[in-house]
Image (tube, grey):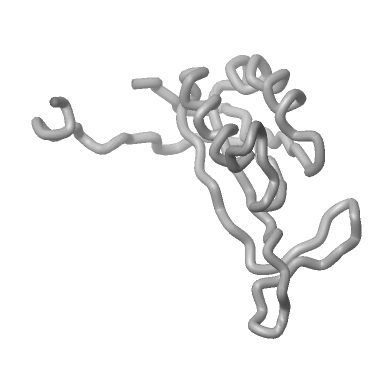
Amino acid sequence: MTQLHGSALRVTILVGDCDTFHHKPLYSEIVHRAHQAGLAGASVFKGIEGFGASSLIHTSRLLSLSEDLPVAIVIADEEARIRAFLPQLDELVTEGLVILDKCEVIRYVGRRETKEEAQ
């Protein structure tokens, strides 16, 4: 398991939940590639309303028919590891926003693996 404490870099990727890469949800492809790259972790958050460069507002309100709601994928790790991952994001994110922030990790602890999970 990756050890992470102190100075780190956070990358936030904002895309639409309908965005795809080779017929697979884009957010899922990003998470799986981050996992394959050995990054500390990635989480996906679905928004209820937002707009981007197109200036079209997408919302989950009952009277709206919008299906392309905003999605944020957040990944944090050591700066060098995040920067090494950025070329993959350049390949994957053709529409959206990629943001880098310096951050400080104060706690990074995984669940202990049970005997059943290990098998």
Residue extending farthest bottom? 63
The image shows residue 101 at horizontal and vertical percentages of: 69, 36
Which residue ends up furthest to the front in the rendered image? Answer: 23
Q: Position of residue 13 (x, y in %)?
A: 68, 41
Please state which of residues 44 and 104 is positioned toward the viewer in this rendering.
44
| Direction from residue 2 to residue 50 in the image, left or right | right
Question: Looking at the image, which residue sits at the far left?
Answer: 115
Q: Is residue 68 above or below residue 85?
A: below
**Position of residue 21 in the picture relative to residue 6 (left or right):** right
Foreground of the two, 116 or 39: 116
* Residue 53 as seen in the image, left or right of residue 91: right
What quarter of the picture does the N terminus occupy? Answer: top left
User: Whole-percent x and y of residue 26?
Assistant: 63, 39
Residue drawn where x is 72% and y is 18% of the image: 87
Rendered view: 1 above or below 74: above
**Quarter that holds the C terminus:** top left
15 over 105 or under it: above or below: below
User: Is 67 placed left or right of 74 in the picture?
Assistant: right
Residue 88 in the image: state x and y as whole percent.
Answer: 68, 21
